């Protein structure tokens, strides 16, 4: 029997990526060419009144989907570390996924019982994966 | 799982920070302006606190600062007897509006066409920003220096606070509609358009009134003299800070004190929620601005979420942080591997 108990970790402070940037001490700042950089790529603007909430949502979904697909492309040929259930870790070279991203085709899969030249990892078995671009 | 709040300190000012304001949410994010006794108001990116620029030109302490809704213009009120209007994108000074005494407060209308000012000369002034040479319209009536003046009710009315009164004026007729009297000095005022709520602080009290009728809604008492308070956009919380250097967070509905934070090294002069309610900013006598998370531990801005660890180790803990340029980097690598994805048919539901 292996009951998974959630330990209450000691109170820690929220991690931060970095501190806010301060003045450069040299100039008064502001955009060099007098223009701000938009947060997202410029899309042809549809006035909000015309664009329904639904199509706004759909655009957001499309953007997120595109980002995910690009991340998969970026992984091709790289070494990826997979965390599977029961705390199992494996690494492999990522090849491709199928259309529904149900399976990952990998090669040189390092498993606790040896190296598998080619393998299919079921996505339902994967908790998380990570790679360095 | 209890996580301790990590405030983000924005340094740069050399004297007390006496006022701060957020813009609305724009396609470029939202922005924050801070007024400082060093005479150099600063513009920062609202969600990270990153410095963008410093508005140079005032010759005295800047007592009030504000941004228009889309953060294209800034206005400042200073001890050099002027209010200035700035281009918030380039940092250039657009207008200097001469007054007869220290100017303490500035506020844009929703359409940015008019600027309201108030100060020690006890007059409210309305400037038409499309006709800067024209004389402003003046409203008199206050008997002590004006500390804060705000447009309300879709710019049809004006709220102004001096030492002991808060007054409501009709814009069209320029006459007083109603006033509230206080025994103690009014330290701050905030106007919440959705719900027409006015937040007033005086002594240790944080009071909420209707902005339309000035009728009281409710009030809370803090453990120390409060200098400024702000109500969360969804009206679930309020935050307040004052003379004991601490920030307090209360449940707006029950009045229960939820959290309190030490961090500043001097009294807190101003505190405001961001327009999305995800963080609040505080300005202090210690010369710093600090950003605080509304929900401690949430991934937002520079704060990074850490998922709970399970016994077998960090299963889903993100090991790589994704900087803003990640998308471009991924695109570069992806294009090495294949042809670009046709992104013109967003039919696939993610």
Image (tube, grey):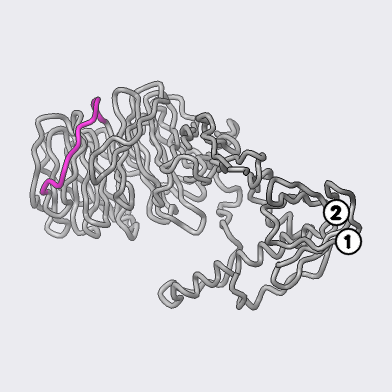
Provide the secondary structure element on which disc 2 rests. Answer: strand
- Asked whether the beta carbons under mark 1 and mark 2 sit within 8 Å of each other, the answer is yes
Provide the secondary structure element on which disc 1 rests. Answer: strand
* Residue at figure coordinates x 56%, y 36% from the top left: A15
Tell me, yes or no, if residue B85 can be seen here.
no
User: Which of B264 and A37 lies nearest the eye of the viewer?
Assistant: B264
| Number of other residues with Cα within 10 Å of mark 2, as a class: few under 14, some 14 to 19, many 20 or more | many
| Magenta stretch in the rendered image | B215-226
* Residue A93, percent from left and from top: 84, 55
* Residue B322, percent from left and from top: 65, 48
The magenta stretch spans residue B217: yes
Check disc 2 and report the residue beneath it: A109
* Residue at figure coordinates x 83%, y 53% from the top left: A92
Using the image, name the chain to which the residue with label 1 belongs.
Answer: A
Using the image, name the chain to which the residue with label 2 belongs.
Answer: A
* Residue B201, percent from left and from top: 21, 36
Same chain, labels 1 and 2:
yes
Q: Is residue A70 above or below residue A113?
A: below
Check disc 1 and report the residue beneath it: A118
As drawn, which residue projects farthest toward the front? A1
User: Which of B313 and B269 lies nearest the eye of the viewer?
Assistant: B313
* Residue B14, percent from left and from top: 46, 25
Q: Quadrant of residue B101?
A: top left
* Residue at figure coordinates x 50%, y 70% from the top left: A57
Number of numbered markers: 2
């Amino acid at each position: 029997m292996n009951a998974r108990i959630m330990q209450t970790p000691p109170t820690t402070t929220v991690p931060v990526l970095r501190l806010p940037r301060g003045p450069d001490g040299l100039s008064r700042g502001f955009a060099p060419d007098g223009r701000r950089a938009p947060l997202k790529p410029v899309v042809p603007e549809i006035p909000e009144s015309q664009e329904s909430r639904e199509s706004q949502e759909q655009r957001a979904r499309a953007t997120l989907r595109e980002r995910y697909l690009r991340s998969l492309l970026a992984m091709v040929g790289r070494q990826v570390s997979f965390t599977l259930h029961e705390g199992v870790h494996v690494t492999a070279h990522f090849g491709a996924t199928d259309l529904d991203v149900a399976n990952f085709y990998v090669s040189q899969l390092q498993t606790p019982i040896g190296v598998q030249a080619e393998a299919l990892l079921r996505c339902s078995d994967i908790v998380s994966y990570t790679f360095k671009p | 799982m209890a996580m301790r709040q990590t405030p983000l300190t924005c340094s740069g000012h050399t004297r007390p920070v006496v006022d701060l304001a957020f813009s609305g949410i724009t396609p470029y994010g939202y922005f924050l302006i801070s007024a400082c006794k060093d005479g150099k108001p600063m513009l920062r990116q609202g969600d990270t606190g990153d410095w963008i620029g410093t508005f140079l030109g005032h010759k005295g302490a800047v007592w009030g600062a504000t941004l228009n809704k889309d953060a294209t213009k800034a206005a400042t009120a200073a001890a050099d007897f002027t209010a200035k209007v700035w281009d918030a994108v380039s940092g250039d000074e657009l207008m200097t509006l001469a007054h007869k005494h220290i100017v303490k407060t500035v506020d844009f209308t929703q359409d940015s066409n008019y600027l309201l000012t108030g100060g020690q000369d006890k007059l409210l002034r309305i400037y038409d920003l499309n006709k800067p040479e024209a004389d402003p319209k003046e409203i008199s009536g206050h008997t002590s220096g004006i500390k804060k003046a705000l447009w309300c009710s879709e710019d049809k009315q004006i709220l102004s606070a001096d030492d002991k009164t808060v007054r409501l004026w009709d814009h069209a007729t320029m006459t007083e509609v109603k006033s509230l009297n206080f025994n103690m000095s009014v330290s701050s005022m905030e106007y919440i358009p959705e719900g027409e709520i006015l937040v007033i602080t005086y002594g240790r009290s944080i009071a909420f009134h209707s902005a339309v009728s000035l009728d009281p809604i409710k009030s809370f008492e803090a453990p120390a003299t409060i200098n400024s308070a702000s109500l969360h956009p969804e009206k679930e919380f309020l935050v307040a800070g004052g003379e004991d250097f601490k920030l307090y967070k209360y449940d707006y509905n029950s009045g229960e004190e939820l959290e309190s934070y030490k961090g500043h090294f001097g009294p807190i002069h101003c505190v405001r929620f961001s327009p999305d309610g995800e963080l609040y900013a505080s300005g202090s006598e210690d010369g710093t601005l600090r950003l605080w998370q509304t929900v401690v531990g949430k991934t937002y801005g520079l704060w990074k979420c850490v998922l709970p660890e399970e016994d077998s180790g960090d299963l889903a803990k993100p090991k790589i942080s994704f900087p803003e340029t990640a998308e471009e980097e991924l695109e570069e690598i992806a294009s090495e591997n294949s042809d670009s994805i046709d992104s013109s048919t967003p039919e696939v539901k993610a």
